[in-house]
Image (cartoon, rainbow, N blue to C red):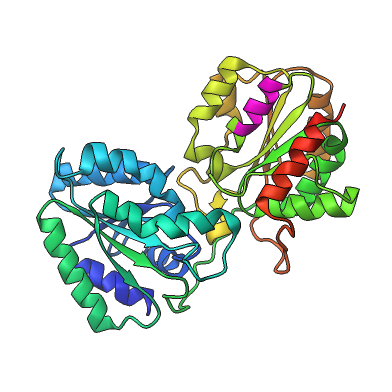
Amino acid sequence: MRASIFLQELKRIGIHTIAGVPDSTLKQFCDAIQLDEGKQFQHYVTANEGAAVGLATGIYLATKQPCLVYLQNSGLGNIINPLASIANCEVYGIPMLFVIGWRGEPGKKDEPQHVYQGKITDTLLEVMNVSYAIIDDATTQEQLSEIFTEARKVLDNNRQYAVIVKKDTFEKEQKFEWKNGYSFVREQALRVILQNVYQNSYIVSTTGKISRELYEQCQMLFGNHDRLFMTVGGMGHASMIAFGIAQADRAKRIVCIDGDGAVMMHMGALAFIAKQSPSNFLHIVINNAAHESVGAIPTGFSGQTYAQVAKACGYHRVSTVDTEQDLNKALQMASSRQELSMIEVMTALDARVDLGRPKESAKENGIHFMESLQER
């Protein structure tokens, strides 16, 4: 199925505003929205999926026009609260259409963090009283048109409707290409960070390619990754996991290696961590202004930096770097001080095409990390 056909059907049923968080399963759909450039649709990449539901609610209240909210099924948890307590027909009755990428579909090989979520995707929608249809690469244009006609009827009754999209549903069409203007390669930046902190710290890394690159770099540099906890799921929660470790064992130095999209998803963590001000906590944000792991779509905060946000929240010392030399200096300065700090590293897009994945299971890696933490 061509994503352009999908967009035509959206327009036919009166959808003019699209909001959400990019997903690799929906890559061609997201590309098509970006290439639309506001010609047919108003498009917003929101901080998280729940925020997209809030935006869609506001648009409907002002225009009486339902919106489309797109997300990976892992983002269902973020929409449940606003869906149940605001949009549901027993509350305000705000109609909206969901387009959900189905990661972890039963019977299909996928990454460990998607397996359970994949099993309960349709069940969650049923519990939330959201009608849905499932489409795949065999869905015809006529069948899609019938689905959207049914969806429009549901929306007209002030309810919500979801289209679950299986892997490889959309054909490859014109690819959205975008560069952020930075040249510092992320993998090189991560190597520099590890060389400075790995042997005297414990690292919590965010979901996506950052963790995959750190895993490979740890193996190459040190022959192990025991001091690395990879937060393979739960985007946006790595900093609070790191904070929990830092509070539980204040004798150990904890480094959180975050991504810009992840920080934005739950930015309130910055204020909370700053208030607690753990002196053994170093927060490193790798900022390439994009949701790269799911298609290199610019974030809703692209072009901005997080260091000054952290400073305003109460981080003691912050810096922004975009070269290896400046990164080394910032890391050496941070290691010489016992105070809450943030280093923001501005990096280019793209990763190696042969980038691997951890060979061990998530549970095995978690056990190794815990054992390493117990060492004195």
Q: Is residue 40 left or right of residue 341?
A: left
Tell me which residue sits at (16%, 68%) in the image.
150
Q: Can residue 210 be seen in this view?
A: no
Identity of the residue drawn at 55% across and 37% down: 237
In magenta, the rendered stretch is 241-248
Give yes or no for residue 339 being in the magenta stretch.
no
**Horizontal and vertical percent position of residue 82:** 29, 39
* Residue 269 in view: yes
Depth check, front residue: 328 or 148: 148
For image coordinates 79% across by 37% down, the residue present is: 371
43 w.r.t. 142: above or below: above
**Can you say which quadrant of the picture contains the N terminus?**
bottom left
Residue 244 shown in magenta:
yes
Quarter placement of the C terminus: top right
Expressed as whole percent of the image width and height from the top left, the position of residue 89 reads 15, 45
Rendered location of residue 111, percent (x, y)? 59, 60
Front residue (pair 33, 263): 263
